[in-house]
Image (cartoon, rainbow, N blue to C red):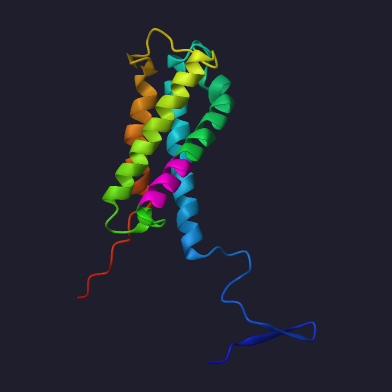
């Protein structure tokens, strides 16, 4: 098997399958997963803003920028929880596999533990506080609990679904 070669400026170089900036299919799927995760969490952060004292009474445009780091933090939580689930199951590509229930449950559990820990620390350190409109479960706001319970499965559904296969006629 011989590799195709291309001559550039008089030098013979191996031909590439695509442009040098093109990401591998696997990288595109991870990037899509991260983007969907970010967009879902950013929308949630915007919607839950009035439940936190520092955002109460502000317009959407006034708290849109401060919600960006929070949404990026949510992506980091998702990545750390993914690493935990991948390490325990030794399946790093589990979001794109058919049988992903066990790592997905570990991912969800790890994300909930990280979220609860971070919320408890942030509230106790005065980093943020809940308004009286925020329902709480054992000192943790219900909105962040629902955020981690609902959005990760939704991000899996939206970003990691397999394309439908063509049915032969």
User: Residue 119, how many percent across, how many down?
Assistant: 45, 22
Q: Which residues are magenta?
A: 78-88
Height in image: 30 above or below 127?
below
Which quarter of the rendering shows the C terminus?
A: bottom left
User: Residue 58, how many percent across, how many down?
Assistant: 53, 14
Q: Image quarter for residue 143?
A: top left
* Direction from residue 92 to residue 62 in the image, left or right: right
Q: 168 or 97: nearer the eye? A: 97
Height in image: 40 above or below 124?
below
Instruction: Looking at this view, name the residue that lies furthest to the top.
Output: 132
Total numbered badges shown on the rendered structure = 0
Which residue shows up at 52% across the image and 34% down it? 73
Q: 78 or 15: nearer the eye? A: 78
Which residue shows up at 37% across the image and 30% down it? 147
Which residue shows up at 61% across the image and 77% down it? 16
Q: Image quarter for residue 81?
A: top left
């Amino acid at each position: 098997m011989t590799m195709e070669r291309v001559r550039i400026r008089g030098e013979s170089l191996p031909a590439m399958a695509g442009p040098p900036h093109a990401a591998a299919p696997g990288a595109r799927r991870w990037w899509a997963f991260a983007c969907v995760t970010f967009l879902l969490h950013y929308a949630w952060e915007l919607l839950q803003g009035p439940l936190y004292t520092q955002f109460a009474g502000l317009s959407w445009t006034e708290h849109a920028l401060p919600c960006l780091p929070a949404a990026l933090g949510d992506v980091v939580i998702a990545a750390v929880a993914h690493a935990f689930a991948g390490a325990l199951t030794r399946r790093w590509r589990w979001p794109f596999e058919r049988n992903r229930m066990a790592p997905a449950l570990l991912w969800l559990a790890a994300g909930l533990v990280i979220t609860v820990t971070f919320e408890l620390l942030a509230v106790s350190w005065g980093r943020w506080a809940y308004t009286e409109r925020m329902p709480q479960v054992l000192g943790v706001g219900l909105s962040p609990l629902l955020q981690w319970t609902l959005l990760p499965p939704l991000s899996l559904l939206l970003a990691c679904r397999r394309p439908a296969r063509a049915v032969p006629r």
